[in-house]
């Protein structure tokens, strides 16, 4: 899958869970930079991404994610 | 040796002087000296458990390297299991053995079997809940490849035993603390002064606010059967403020003392009473414990249950908070305290409003009426859970609450010293005002940007308040955990 397709889909997921779109998707983006992306909403975002791309993460892969770039790469490797 | 004692002053002054004058050459020298001072500090508090602390350091240091070096996945897990059993085992033995032992005998009693002696005499090693969580977190971070284990036993020992935080936290993370210990610390005037400021604020919170609240709440809780509901309500209020001022005051002093040595510990409280929902409250209350629980309990659990969506999330939150409660001690009251907080999350999760995490009234002087209403309702909800935090047994807690919500709640409060209550109310007002205006800053008393008159005016005011209204105290609530 193309990187920008993945990014767009991730953006849709974030918008639907967090109910706002006050963020720009870029590789250095972290959860801290996005309003409402906290430990409670995190797992809902992850679950929704898994459903959208029809993939499954491992917890250790998620623990290692440092930013959006790493998440997008991880999705690309799985999808 | 508590921070607000002459003993501590006699300890810290020479330690600071030697540290910055004699041992400043390399990070190794600094760490050798700080570790010696830390072990002395711990031994002073309770020398009997020094060997335990050292054993814990050695075992965890060795396991960290083992986990990292091992390539076979099964063996890696095995080493992590050994580490977990060791750390949790220490906690279980020293802190929880009587709880389970008595529970076991209760069950035998239910089945009509006789029980003999129902408890062991086990002393609780100081700080054990804090340092075992720190080392456990370290091993899990190494296992998850989030950090490299340190190969320097000196740095690792200091990471565990660093004296400002050994007795009561903050529960530090290796990723924050160890890199700071690897570098040589240089004396910086602004950081040093900021540390002093934070200590002063912590001292004020502890010996003025917490101790005056305690002077009101203690007699009320001790004789609650004889008091009208209105007095009991006051008792709950003052205890809730005491609990906060005691532990956040302690934390500010610990972080401040650490800054004097050029080491930045993590923030432990971030004006939690100015939160508008329970999620925000816990993001700001005992942050080092909450984030620990989030990373090592909540995240794996909610990941496992993620297919159950909100129901799974809810189960994970409630379980996590039961653990948070139980961490405080081997008593059903703490379990219920955690459970109540977990239950408070239900409306938040199901309303879908859990995605907010902002400073309340950001950039404004005053909050809106709606925000005031939310903060107050949240405070009241939390205040009632503190009765469970305080009570010796669940029965006591319920009977206290039962008496509070009786007809006598509307009577004039009796059995209290009016002048003390009014003065303490006024002091709490000042305390909360200062926290409110600094709620977006790095700590509650970060006033470096103020002009010199305002800064020194504040210092002098605090000194005067401490002199006139301060009460001495030998302990902190969180030392028992």
Image: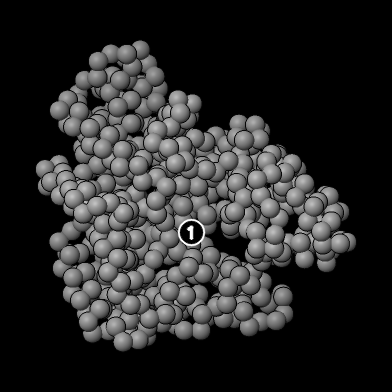
In this picture, residue B134 sits left or right of residue B185: right
Question: Which chain is disc 1 placed on?
Answer: B
Residue B243 location, quadrant:
top left
The quadrant the N terminus of chain B occupies is: bottom left
Q: Look at the image and tell me whether residue B330 can be seen.
A: no
Where's residue B141, x and y in %?
58, 68
Q: Please name the residue shown 27% across and 23% down the image.
A: B231
Where's residue B316, x and y in %?
64, 46
Q: Please name the residue shown 55% across and 43% down the image.
A: B357
Residue extending furthest front? B451
- Closer to the camera in the image, B345 or B44: B345
Q: Please name the residue shown 29% across and 75% down the image.
A: B187
Colouring scheme, one of rainbow, by chain, secondary structure, one colour: one colour
Instruction: Please tell me whether residue B101 is drawn above or below residue B195 in the rendered image.
Output: above
SS at circle 1:
helix
Q: Look at the image and tell me whether residue B188 can be seen.
A: yes
Instruction: Please tell me whether residue B27 is drawn above or below residue B310 in the rendered image.
Output: below
Residue B391 location, quadrant:
top left
Where's residue B304, x and y in %?
72, 52
Instruction: Please tell me whether residue B147 is drawn above or below residue A13 in the rendered image.
Output: below
Q: Please name the residue shown 22% across and 32% down the image.
A: B426
Where's residue B131, x and y in %?
43, 65
Residue B334 location, quadrant:
top left
Q: Which residue is mark 1?
A: B92
In this picture, residue B477 sits left or right of residue B395: left
In this picture, residue B131 sits left or right of residue A34: left
């Amino acid at each position: 899958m193309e990187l920008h397709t993945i990014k767009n889909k991730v953006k849709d997921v974030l918008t639907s869970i967090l109910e706002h779109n006050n963020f720009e998707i870029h590789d250095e983006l972290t959860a801290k930079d996005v309003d409402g992306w906290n430990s409670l909403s995190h797992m809902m975002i992850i679950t929704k991404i898994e459903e959208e791309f029809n993939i499954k993460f491992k917890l250790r892969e998620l623990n290692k994610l440092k930013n959006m770039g790493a998440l997008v790469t991880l999705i690309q490797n799985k999808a | 040796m508590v921070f607000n004692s002459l003993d501590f002053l006699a300890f810290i002054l020479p330690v600071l002087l030697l540290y910055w004058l004699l041992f400043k050459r390399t990070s190794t020298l600094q760490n050798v000296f700080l570790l010696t001072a830390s072990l002395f500090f711990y031994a002073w508090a309770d020398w009997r458990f020094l060997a335990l602390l050292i054993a814990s350091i050695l075992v965890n240091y060795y396991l960290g390297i083992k986990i990292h070096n091992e390539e076979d996945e099964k063996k890696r897990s095995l080493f992590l299991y050994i580490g977990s059993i060791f750390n949790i085992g220490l906690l279980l033995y020293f802190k929880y053995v009587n709880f389970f032992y008595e529970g076991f005998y209760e069950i035998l009693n239910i089945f009509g079997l006789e029980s003999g002696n129902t408890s062991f005499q086990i002393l609780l090693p100081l700080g054990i809940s804090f340092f075992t969580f720190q080392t456990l977190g370290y091993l899990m971070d190494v296992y998850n490849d989030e950090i490299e284990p340190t190969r320097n036993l000196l740095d690792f020992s200091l990471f565990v035993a660093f004296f400002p935080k050994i007795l009561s936290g903050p529960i530090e993370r290796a990723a924050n603390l160890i890199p700071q210990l690897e570098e040589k610390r240089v004396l910086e005037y602004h950081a040093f002064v900021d540390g002093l400021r934070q200590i002063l604020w912590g001292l004020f919170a502890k010996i003025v606010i917490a101790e005056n609240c305690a002077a009101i709440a203690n007699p009320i809780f001790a004789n609650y059967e004889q008091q009208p509901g209105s007095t009991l309500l006051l008792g709950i209020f003052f205890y809730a403020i005491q609990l906060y001022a005691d532990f956040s005051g302690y934390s500010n002093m610990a972080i401040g003392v650490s800054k004097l040595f050029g080491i930045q510990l993590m923030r432990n409280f971030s004006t939690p009473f100015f939160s508008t929902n329970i999620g925000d409250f816990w993001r700001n209350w005992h942050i080092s414990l909450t984030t620990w629980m989030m990373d090592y309990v909540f995240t794996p659990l909610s990941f496992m249950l993620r297919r159950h969506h909100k129901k799974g999330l809810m189960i994970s939150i409630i379980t996590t908070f039961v653990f948070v409660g139980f961490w405080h001690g081997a008593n059903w009251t703490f379990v219920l305290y955690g459970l109540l907080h977990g239950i408070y999350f239900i409306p938040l999760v199901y309303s879908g409003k859990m995605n907010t995490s902002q400073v309340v009234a950001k950039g404004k002087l005053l909050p809106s009426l709606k925000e005031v209403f939310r903060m107050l309702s949240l405070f009241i909800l939390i205040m009632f859970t503190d009765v469970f935090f305080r009570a010796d047994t669940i029965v006591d807690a319920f009977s206290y609450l039962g008496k509070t919500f009786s007809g006598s709640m509307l009577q004039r409060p009796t059995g209290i010293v009016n002048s003390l209550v009014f003065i303490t109310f006024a002091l709490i007002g000042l305390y909360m005002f200062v926290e409110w205006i600094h709620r977006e800053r790095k700590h509650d008393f970060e006033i470096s940007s103020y002009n010199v008159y305002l800064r020194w005016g504040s210092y002098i005011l605090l000194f005067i308040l401490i002199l006139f209204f301060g009460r001495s105290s030998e302990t902190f609530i969180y030392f028992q955990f």
